[in-house]
Amino acid sequence: MKKGKKRMKVFVTGVAGQLGHDVMNELAKRGYKGIGSDIAPAYSGVQDGSAVTTMPYVSMDITDGVAVEKTLLEIHPDVIVHCAAWTAVDAAEDEDKQAKVKAINVDGTQNIANAAKKIDAKMVYISTDYVFDGQGTTPWEPDCKAYAPVNVYGQTKLGGELAVSGTLEKYFIVRIAWVFGLNGKNFIKTMLNVGKTHPEVRVVNDQIGTPTYTLDLARLLVDMIETDKYGYYHATNEGGYISWYDFTVEIYKQAGMDTKVTPVTTAEYGLSKAARPYNSRLDKSKLTANGFQPLPAWQDAVGRYLSALKEQGEF
């Protein structure tokens, strides 16, 4: 933090999740004042002894507009990093859950944006490549407006984007993909567990993208809020575009596991309620164009993540 600079106060939603947890720790590392929030009465994420576990915490239901306004007017942060979301992609397709998914991802985001406007706070909204149709092979550019989500989750995340861009001027909409972090379930943890009990796994090889390590993303997000370079960004780890099959092969290689990985097409794999995009390639060149440091290579991120899991005794 630069000398003489006001100590930035940052309100983070979704701290019981992977990214919120890491954003709080990154804020603490830089000497900023982070206030965490989620729906539970107290911090309910991983008890890993990191800063977030003892930082200020406020219980808040983002779907309650009155509560959101009251909380944020009271705390009056300089920045709101909105990580809270419904992220269970397949469950979002269930008819009995769709109203709740929309209430969280669209209305909840609108409530936060309304409050941000009232207190003139910057807002960061975390989004997804699922706002696009996932066709073709060309990487999606951050300012592309050809929105065509193929599932309910994507529709509601797009609804959240439009709530932010339609309400505020001081916003960062940051799209990510294939997320993994310490504080929650993710593909790497799933594959490690499956690999321990199965000699062979089948993994799709026709959905292409890049993973995002929340620890690396948190650093970038805090870099962003130190600036006023607002707009749309894409942010996943570097290291080239891969399939889920390629990702799995690398995970097992670094974990020293000899589980056989068999590539299959999405059609052969079947099993998923929600349609998945084939093309999750995100063009990240806008980051460097605006002076931001890209994320490290995903292969490197996997190595650091596996070490962190080992420290937690999870692997």
Image (cartoon, grey):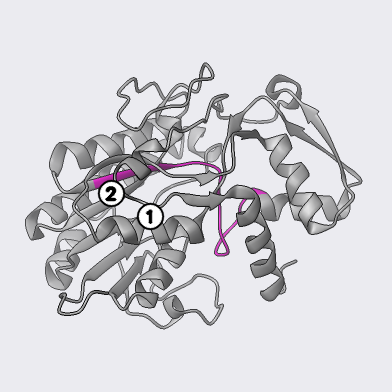
Mark 2 vs mark 1: which is more N-terminal? 1
Residue 38 vs 248, above or below: the answer is below
Is 242 one of the magenta-colored residues? no
Q: Would residue 81 be found to the left or right of residue 263 on screen?
A: left
Looking at the picture, how far across and down is residue 96, in whole percent? Answer: 46, 37
User: Is the Cβ of the residue at disc 2 closer than 8 Å to that at disc 1?
Assistant: yes
| Quadrant position of residue 83 | bottom left
Can you tell which quarter of the image residue 286 is in? top left
Quadrant of image for the N terminus: bottom left
Please, what is the three-letter code of the amino acid marked with disc 1? Ala
Please tell me which residue is depicted at 37% across the width and 64% down the height of the picture.
39
Left or right side of 251 for 301: left
On the image, the x and y values in percent for residue 308 come to 64, 69
- Does dot 1 land on a helix, a strand or a loop? loop
Q: In this view, does 203 lie to the left or right of 296?
A: right
Q: Position of residue 68 (x, y in %)?
A: 21, 60
The residue to which callout 2 is attached is: 108
> Which amino acid type is shown beneath numbered disc 2?
Gly
Q: Residue 84 shows which numbered tag?
A: 1
Secondary element type, mark 2: helix
- Foreground: disc 2 or disc 1: 1
Stretch of the chain drawn in magenta? 172-187
Q: Which residue is drawn at 28% across and 75% down?
A: 32
Image location of residue 93, percent across then percent down: 50, 32
In the image, what residue occupies the spot 48% across and 37% down? 92
